[in-house]
Structure formats: C-alpha cells, structure tokens
Amino acid sequence: MKLATLCAVVLVVESYALAVTPSANEMTVARVWTEANLGPTAQSLPFSFSYDGRRSAELLPAWQVKWSSAQLDPNRTQHTIVWTDPKTGLELRCVAVAYSDFPTVEWTLHFKNTGAADTPILADILALDTRLEREPSGEFLLHHNVGSPCQQNDFEPLETALGPKAEKRISAAGGRPTNSDLSYFNLEWSQQGVIVVIGWPGQWAARFTRDESRGLRLQAGQELTHLKLRPGEEIRSPLVLMQFWQGDWIRSQNIWRRWMLAHNTPRVAGKPVSTHFASTSGNLTDAGREMALINGYVREGIKLDYWIMDAGWYPHPGKWFYTGTWEVDRKRFPRGLREVNDCAHAHGMKTVVWFEPERVMPGSWLYENHPEWLLGCPKESSQTPQLGKFANRLLNLGNPDARRWVTDHVSKILADEGIDVYRQDFNIDPLAYWRANDAPDRQGITENAYVSGYLAYWDKLLRRHPNLWIDTCASGGRRNDLETMRRAIPLLRSDYFSEPIGQQCQTHGLSLWMPVYGSGTGAHDSYMIRSSICPMFRIAWNTRKPDLDYAFLRRMVSEFRQIESYLIGDFYPLTPYSRANNIWMAWQFDQPEIGGGVVQAFRRAESPDAAARFRLRELQSVAHYVVTDLDSRESQRMTGRELMNDGLPVHLPQRPGAALIVYRKSSD
C-alpha cells in the first residue's frame, strides 16, 4: 500500500492530550508500512543493490528466503529476513526493529559470503530505496540541517522544496558523517510526514528525487560500494530509521526527541546520562595545575559534576596533536592521571579524559612499532589546518589486530587511572585514507570494515566497563550520526564556541534533533554564558586566581541548576532562526509531565527593541502558571491561554541582553 493512500485511510482529526504523545493514527501508519515493506509477505522492499550486474528486485525473488521474529523487550520487536543466493552463497540478512511505543522502524543490511570463492561484484548498495506519494494537493518539503564545519552557521535549519522533477543530494564530507550536513531529515507534505535518519559514521549519501507526478524517491547508503567479498567476509549497510508523523512538524521533532531519550541515548546502570555542570583545565597541563583548578572550585563552593582533562597528558614535543603514544607522561604526571582523578573523586566529581587513538603522528609509538596497522594516504586530507601539513596516519580499526590492541590498551588505562568517561576525538578526515587503500574491485571495503571496527571497539569498551560512558568529539560535532549517538554524547557540540550568536544558533538548530549535548565557555559575562547554556554545560575559569568575581560565577551556576531539568524537555523555537545581530531570538523547553519549563530569550547587540512577546507552546489553557524572571526574581501569574495567545512579555533594557524565565503550573 502506498504511504499516501494509507495516510488518507487513517488521517482524522485527533485531540492530543499531550502534543508529544504519538497518536493511534501514527502508530497505525508505521505498523502497516512495516508489514508491507519488511513483513513476511513484503512485496516492495525499502532497499536495493546490484549483484553481478543485475538489480536486487530481479534477483531476490529467486533466492532462498527465511523470515523470523523475536521480542527484544516490551517495546521492540526484531524481524530478520535472510536471503541466500543458491549459486554463489551470498547471504543477505536484513535486521529490522519495530517499536510499539513510537511510530518508528529501523533496519540494517548485512552481506556475507558463505561460499568457497570470491563473489561477483556487489555494488550500489542503497540501505534506503523507497518511494513516497503525496495527495493531489500540497507538496513535499524537506527539513534538514547544516552539520558542524566549525562556522557560525553550524546546525542551521534548512528547508528545500521538492516540486516536480526536483532533486536534492546531500552527503557527508571527508568521511566524518556530520562534517558538512546532518544525516537527519524530516520530509513534510499535507500535514504529515516522515523522519528519515541515516546512521553511518562514515561517508554516506542521500538523494531525494521527485518525478513528474506525485512521487518522491528516497535513496541513501554508503556513498561508494563496488566490491567483491572473499569467502567468510561480511559487510554491513548504514542503519536506516523512519518515524511517521501527522500534524505539525515541530511536534514531530519532539516525538523524535522523546524517542531519542527513550531508546537511543546512552545509559549507565540502566539510567540515562544526566544533565550536568563541568569544568576543564584545557590542553597541555600537568598534575599540579589540574588539582589546583579543581581545588579552586571547591574553595569557592562551586559544585562540579565532572572534571574534564583535555588533550596533552601523553608524551609530546610541545604540541597536543602529536598523538600515537598512549602512555601517561610521568614528568608532568609523576603519579599518573590517577592522582588527579582521585582528587576529583574526593570532592564528588567524576572525570572525563581525552583520547584520539585513530590519528597517528610520525615518531609516535604506534608509528614506529606497528606500521602494518596504519593507513597512509598519498594526499593528506584534514579539516583541521594545524594538522594538514603533517604526515598523519590512520589506525586501521578494520584490522582485527589493531582493534584488539587499542581495546586492551585503552581499557587498561581507563581502569588503572580511574577514569569515569572516555572522550574520543577525531581530528582528521578519513575518506581519502580509506579510498586510497581500496583495490578497483574492492571499492568501499576499507571504509566498511573501519566503521564496523569503530563501533565494535566502543561496544567492547562499554561491555568491559559497565559504568563507563563515552563523549564523542570529532573536531567538535563532526561525528554525530545515529549509530554514534547510540553509544556516546557530544559534550562539545561544535568547535565554534567563541561568540554568543553562534552559540545561540547552535541550540536553535541542534535541539531539533538531539536532546542531550554539551558546550561551554570561559567567558565572564552573563550574555555569553547564557548563550552557551545547554544540557551538558561547562564554564572554564582559572580558579587559581583568587581575585575573580566568584559571586557572579556562583550565580551563573545556580541559574543553570534551576533550569537544567527542563533542558531535555520538548523544544519549541519561538522565533525564526537568524544570525542577524539586530533581532531577538528565543526558544522554549517544556516538561509537561511536571508542568514547567524555561524560556531563553536574547536581545542581540543591534536590536532596537527593548521588549518583545513570545507565544509559548503546548501549555494547558485553563491552568495558571507562576512565571519567574531569574534576574529580577519577580513572579507573575498567567494562564496558559494568556501565555499562548497574548504571549510572554520580556523586557531587556540592556543590549546585548539575555533573559532566563522559568514557569511552573500552579497547584491552586
């Protein structure tokens, strides 16, 4: 059944008790689509490939097929379909997971050569290849976002109209999946739509192609696959996820945020990683400086949840980016990192420690002792200018011996040094390295093995250390695909964090897709600090200096503590996205289950308006709310109807200025 026809059958006007609760109609659409495309009698599969020059739609009906189902937990059912080519022994396994609490389905393809000889060429693997059809009225609109190229427009929300014969191609850049564009999309048409997400920590590509009528073809996968498989060899496709929705597209983004929190955000001991406040020493420090800074926060009565030890704790010739020797520098840390971590633990803090195991520099231990584990590249490629002139090598995580060594070695450091959070950075574009090491009949194999090895490495670390969680940092936010977000949290969402407009715009754009992420600042003014606030937040001050305005810092931290629980609630932009310096920008985080939320509003430096009103979203019309400005500490009572219809008044006489306003439903 075509999606448009199905939606027409079930689309009726519904009254949502909570705008963020999936409706019965949405659940029906997802269930019927899953049965029609991935069920035991599926006639139209949502993927494609070519094998020995023939398309999968032609081949698969003649292959042997088995279908099975298993209940993973109360809300997830796994469906597995296995096709086997009787001639060559190529096995295709499609593993799909359907959710019963969200209108969501995901799947991954696995290809394995079970024969005794090399397979023919397997090519053009599209993990997603399906068609949507709209109603006679309305048109397709694609919502998508810039990635994290370390510019002021990082995570900018974009819209692309897809009229007849339109085509839009979007891809990763350089092999890091969110380097240029996010791999998260929302297709809207006729008050309904589907969220489509590609989970691939490598070079993915997606194409949206409109025909002359009412159809839209969606295609996505690893950008380049043209390869033979050797006996026993197996590759996988990107993870594909679809989530169906009806009504308002911002509402659909909040259902997505809730799915992320319920099913994708990393957990420790069964509980999601919590919002927190942290600080850091920066790069190239020593044990004395680290502990002096920690003790400075303790002295001033500023409670840190995490202490972050950044790059440079290993031997290096004065530059943090000389990586590849993963041993503690005993000259600067004579008692190891354990001394600093024990100091933090004694004051109730947990610790985050930086690693970058994949990038290997000349002269390092890995470079000198295991060149066979390293991928070289005839033409150096790096998005980080300071690294571009060096002969970087890439530790090949697709090599089992290399992966075994790095797993054992890093695991031992984590245990010996008492590290709570493993931070993995990635300051190099790997695509040129991958492709330089592919034979003509093995194009895409190095990348595929590398990506599988990267995920396996993290999975093994997490199994060995059940209380560990991972902070992903790839020159900021360049590796934040869904598979990575299933295992890690980006505590530094972007390397562009030096000015307030960029920070505000990052929250406005990224919050559509990610409920948990981090950023921070070393600023000493409230406008910049408030512009940087997010669920995982840090302020880095040099607390060795006794004459800083610590009363101000305590107030900033207190403000964060008052609103942090709201920051993972439902997200509503209250103004359009803009990088102009003469406007206001505002948004709302709402927690309907506890009847409260926060509004963050910013009057930029050239805005002529000292006051603004913002219509809030999804409150209870007849309920009364106590609204408190965290600057004046003054409160007023307003009904939900007033806040949604007339708007919340905000007055900022200073420019630039930032307001934090909390609201809570009154019990009387």
Image (spheres, helix red, strand yellow):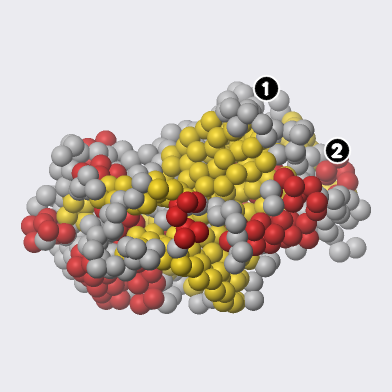
Residue 11 in view, yes or no:
yes
User: Quick one: SS at disc 2?
Assistant: helix
Q: Where is residue 326 in the image (x, y as percent from the top left)?
A: 20, 62
Residue 353 in view, yes or no:
no
Q: In which quarter of the image is residue 280?
A: bottom left
Q: Which of 209 and 428 is in front in this view?
A: 209
| 51 lies left or right of 394 | right
| Kind of residue sitting beneath label 1 | Pro
For disc 2, the marked residue is 646
How many callouts does the rendering have?
2
For disc 1, the marked residue is 608
| 75 lies left or right of 112 | right
Q: Where is residue 84 in the image (x, y as percent from the top left)?
A: 41, 66
User: Quick one: SS at disc 1?
Assistant: loop
Q: Nearer the viewer, residue 429 or 315?
A: 429
Q: Which residue is drawn at 78% across and 60% down?
A: 24
| Kind of residue sitting beneath label 2 | Asp
Q: Which residue is drawn at 91% across and 53% down?
A: 622
Frontmost of labels 1 and 2 is 2
Q: Residue at x 39, y 63 (%)?
A: 85
Dot 2, crowdedness within 10 Å: few (<14), some or many (≥20)?
A: few
